[in-house]
Amino acid sequence: MFTGIVEELGEVIALEPAGDSARLTVRGPLVVSDATHGASIAVNGVCLTVTEFKDDAFTVDVMKETLDRSSLAALEPGSPVNLERPVRAADRLGGHIVQGHVDGVGRIVSREPGERWEVVTVELPQRLARYVVEKGSITVDGVSLTVVEARDDAFTIALIPTTLELTTLGRKGPGDPVNLEVDVVAKYVERLVTAGAVK
């Protein structure tokens, strides 16, 4: 489990196709500092398993399902990526409960700069709109954010200077894809209510 508080801005070293999967190697000195074989690291909000690590980089296998449901297939050497290690039981939950299971890919529609912050509008798949509510939580490229406005086809978020500086969201522009994970609590509530209605 993650919290959506990005620990480090990493850099893609390689994305190598391997049939119906790919091997992704990322430079991230902080997250590699205590890595072990089989450890989880979230890359742009996608929970991946470390298969190799050396010096300041780690390698993961990315399955077809993950490539199809996320924006990872569009990465290339030099691409910046948001990195986060799993939360420990004794840690503060700084963001919200994030599983690292991407629900879909959105696209940045616009950016409106303020004096020290920006309002960003993100288009989302219609099937995810019902889980997004004003002042609710959403994960965008692994970053825990609060929804400013929710619409049927898009939502807005406000990015503070720290987020703009320390994550990929400060570098992405209109048309760029972003990984989206909606609040898992909303999905469970929907499932429980739907199951109850069937009976």
Image: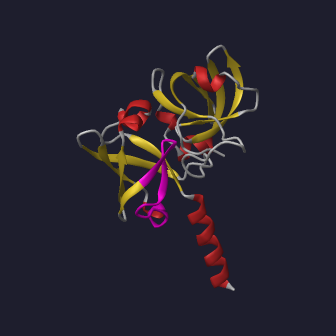
Q: Quadrant of the C terminus?
A: bottom right
Asked which quadrant contains residue 67, the reply is: top right
Q: Is residue 82 above or below residue 141?
A: above
Q: How many marks?
A: 0
Rendered residue at 48%/53% (across/down):
138
User: Where is residue 103 drawn, in percent x and y?
Assistant: 54, 53
Q: Residue 146 or 20: which is nearer the viewer?
A: 146
- Residue extending furthest toward the top: 55
- Residue extending furthest toward the right: 37
Q: Residue 26 or 36: which is nearer the viewer?
A: 36
Q: Is residue 12 above or below residue 131?
A: above
Rendered residue at 62%/19% (across/down):
57
The magenta stretch spans residue 24: no
- Residue extending furthest toward the bottom: 199
The magenta stretch spans residue 131: yes
Rendered residue at 29%/43% (across/down):
118
User: Where is residue 110 drawn, in percent x and y?
Assistant: 27, 46
Q: How is the image coloured?
A: secondary structure
Q: Residue 75 or 17: which is nearer the viewer?
A: 75
Magenta range is: 128-146
User: Where is residue 173 drawn, in percent x and y?
Assistant: 31, 38
Rendered residue at 36%/43% (across/down):
159
